[in-house]
Image (spheres, rainbow, N blue to C red):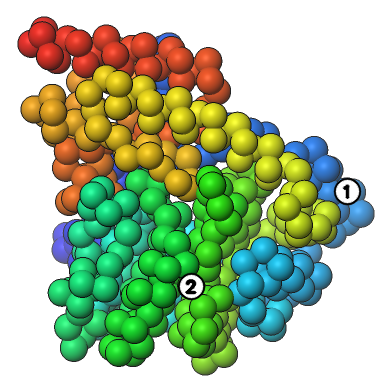
Amino acid sequence: MRSFVNQRAAELKPSGIRKFFDIVSEMKDAISLGVGEPDFITPWHIRNAAVKSIQRGYTQYTGNRGLPVLRELISRYLFERFAAEYPAEHIIVTVGASEAIDLVMRAVCDAGDEILVPDPGYVSYSPCVRLAGGVPVHVPCVQDNGFILTPQQLERCITPRTKALLLPYPNNPTGGIMTREQLEAIVPVIEKHDLLVISDEIYAELTYGGRHVSIAALPGMKERTVLINGFSKAFAMTGWRIGFVCAPPELDAALFKIHQYAIMCAPGASQYAAIEGLKDGFTDNFSVVESMREEYDKRRRFMTRFFNENGLPCFEPRGAFYVYPSTASLGVTGEEFANGLLRAEKVAVVPGDAFGDAGKFHVRCSYATSMANLDTATGRIADYVKKLRAGKAE
């Protein structure tokens, strides 16, 4: 029988993250540093808002764009927190930021269009580009300059087919951020080549040592920027699947049509929960978010120090909740290190090449788990590193 599978889907590689999750789920006493998910429970007042919405019978479809109150709050939130101006009528509430990424690629890509994707970067970016008929072009980002994008790197990768730049900062897996000055440096390149910017800012609330800067807030950039964000990371709401996408009017109309046909609307209970998360205010007294960020900051410093002291050079992340140490000094790839560590010590980390070719000699470790788990896991990792150096590892 002939295959009925679309060629683009057939050629996709399985997720390099999920493979390790599946193994860990069946391994007794294993510790996972792989999951990109807050270990905090969604705050009670947010959960309670969803419960009350169900008790009141609010169980029907919402409007396709999402509840008007939520979209107004998102608009206000973006402006007051990050100076990004998007009116509620150009905001779509999505099933997580993941739906938003897929929507944008389908709305933007014509066959053969090239999308610049920083390498390393989130595992879904390039597959979504390919599924939409586009061509992902990886822009290498290196540790020496904090894994940022530079004007020179962009210029080297741009061709007449380049249509958009995906801008994922704070970055998963590196924890790199881009400052206002660094963003301003790439704006002339973006304008020169008339590029769209797709800015994934899902970790915007998880920065250390300063407020996140959105490229949409820079002069002249809102008109050519699609902003993606959501509630998963900042409010510990991964399972609620609630995100949003903001876009200039013409592109917003295309996004809306695809969303109408593919999804209809985001889950109503999740939308009521998100309203509760935003309605308390938008100042630096964002107490729930702040307390989580402070705890992540302790873990961030602990993990960075551990890897550097154990001879695995590790960039100090300035955002998100990951560290990205190098395994090159051990003479093994990230894939080899991750597989060996899991077998020998029952600790799961993610090979860096799951996030692009630039990660061949790196692994990603999430510190979105308890300090007790991190303490046990680092002890096991230290033991495994000693075995590798002594030539005694399997």
Question: How many numbered discs?
Answer: 2
Query: From the viewer's perspective, is 151 left or right of 289?
Result: left
Q: Is residue 200 above or below residue 277?
A: below
Q: Position of residue 330 (x, y in %)?
A: 13, 24
Q: Is residue 260 above or below residue 39?
A: below
Q: Is residue 283 above or below residue 6?
A: above
* Within-10-Å neighbours for mark 2: few <14, some 14–19, many 20+: many
Where residue 87 is drawn, which disc sits there? none
- Marks 2 and 1 sit apart, C-alpha to C-alpha, by 37 Å
Residue type at tag 1: Lys
**Residue nearer the viewer, 270 or 341:** 341
Report the quarter where the C terminus lies: top left
Report the quarter where the N terminus lies: bottom left
**Residue nearer the viewer, 281 or 54:** 281
Residue linked to disc 1:
52
Quadrant for residue 147, please give it.
bottom left
Q: Position of residue 199 (x, y in %)?
A: 45, 69
Residue at the (62%, 36%) spot, across then down: 294
Where residue 215 is drawn, which disc sits there? 2
Instruction: Please report whichever mark, 2 or 1, sits nearer to the chain's N-terminal start.
Output: 1
Q: Is residue 298 above or below residue 140?
A: above
Quadrant for residue 392, please give it.
top left
Residue type at tag 2: Ile
